[in-house]
Image: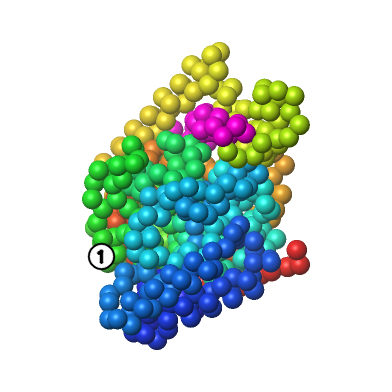
Amino acid sequence: MESMTIHELHEKLIKKEISAVHLTQKLIEHRNSREENIHAFLSFSDEEALAAASRTDARLADGEKISPLEGIPGAIKDNICIEGQKCTAASKMLENWTAPYNASVIDKLKALNFISLGKTNLDEFAMGSTTENSAFGPTHNPWDTRCVPGGSSGGSAAAVCAGEAVWALGSDTGGSIRQPAAFCGLTGLKPTYGRVSRYGLLAFSSSLDQIGTLTKDVTDAACVLNAIAGYDAKDSTSIPDEPEDYTKALAGGVKGMKIGVPREFFGRGIREETKKAIERALHFYEQEGAEIVDVSVPHVNSGVAVYYIIAPAEASSNLARYDGVSYGFRASGSKDIIDMYLQSRSQGFGEEVKRRIMLGTYVLSAGYYEAYYMKALKVRTLLKNDFDKVFKICDVMITPTSSGTAFPFHSFSDPLSLYMEDICTVPVNLTGVPAVSIPVGFSDGKPLGMQIIGPNLCESRILKTAYAFEQAHPEYRKTAPKGEVEL
């Protein structure tokens, strides 16, 4: 059962071939058998999960209809608030903080009687691409536990990949859902900015953050998006537009579509096996009746530089609230209040978070605000204009998700080299458009990812494009082998 999808398990539940309690118990047992080598979770909520499963079974016994997600155990990234549960953001700063309210996505899910098996690991405050930056230890890739699962939603991706949860929520600020999906052989969806409420998501970079989904296939991604999308008055950036039923938009194929291929995404640093896999996919789409169009996104090569000015600047502002006064970690033995601020933030934050806070504070300072931050905002607008021009002639764009497959831990000696791994994903966040990563092949026994990008509010279009490829290539939707090594 741990390898089955949401829609497959839903059919078994409504036919009463399995019970929600039995499914939940089996997944808890499976999770417990894998966690020592994977470390996908930071906390468990087994008691609450079994109670929710019992309610689903009672509803089924009474002949009531259940939603496609009800009774199917998932997992929640530990920067999304669930009332009464810890929400640590994988940081010592919030190690003992209990959320006093639900995120809006959790309220939506609770209305569907959802089952959560626990909170998943991440790079501290979602700052990273490997999940090595967690204050509570790294998560390991189920395909090869010597390798990273990607980040920052690495715990969510590993949990689904290893069959420890059927689906998971993550957050995506610069690729933090799509890159782990690529490394773990999953479908990772970042919706349009504002399509899913951010209320109750611990803020990293408020103009870039977006909650999204990690699932085993495209149908499951549409199913979870149905559950969490929609306007929320609590989020000032929420789009007042009614979402559709994304599962109904999957069929129809790609005949007549125009697919743009921005060659700037295939330059230096993208491995040959990745390029070849994408070329094979493009050939498939052409055979299915789509038109492949070469397009240009001239400012995409500035994307990483722009991102690593804007994101740290917003992080510097957002993380100023963690000062050791009202809540969170407070250092002991301080001489005065200034020393207390200094010691609490020095000891409470990890190295990557402190690096980004300092970088953000620097670019916002009086002497450098115009030279760096304002210039980055202008280039962001140029990049948005590039995307707008492409989508006037194309329905979607296709690019690699990452340069290649998951890499071993400690592969990068300097932060800048690791930041460049985000070159294909950060432009999507800077422009706010939706994108999905799906498996497109394998190299050295590990998955490769393909990114499909669409215009604003066109989740149905990118999911339909992804679905067409997925249905024709079932060999790419494999369950990860137990690639554990002694840790």
Q: Position of residue 45 (x, y in %)?
A: 54, 64
Is residue 466 something that shows in the picture? no
Is residue 239 something that shows in the picture? yes
Above/below status of 218 relative to 33 = above
Q: Position of residue 310 (x, y in %)?
A: 49, 30
Q: Nearer the viewer, residue 449 or 430?
A: 430
Secondary-structure class at tag 1:
helix
Q: Is residue 320 magenta?
A: yes
The residue positioned 39% from the left and 73% from the top of the image is: 55
Q: Position of residue 174 (x, y in %)?
A: 49, 43
Looking at the magenta stretch, what is its main secondary structure?
helix
The residue positioned 44% from the left and 33% from the top of the image is: 299
Above/below status of 203 relative to 220 = above
The residue positioned 37% from the left and 69% from the top of the image is: 70
Callout 1: 10 Å neighbours few (<14), some, many (20+)? few
Residue on which disc 1 sits: 248
Q: Is residue 435 magenta?
A: no
Range covered by the magenta-colored residues: 298-326
Amino acid, disc 1:
Lys
Q: Position of residue 234 (x, y in %)?
A: 34, 41
Rendering quarter of residue 429: top left
Tell me the quadrant of the picture where the C terminus can be found: bottom right
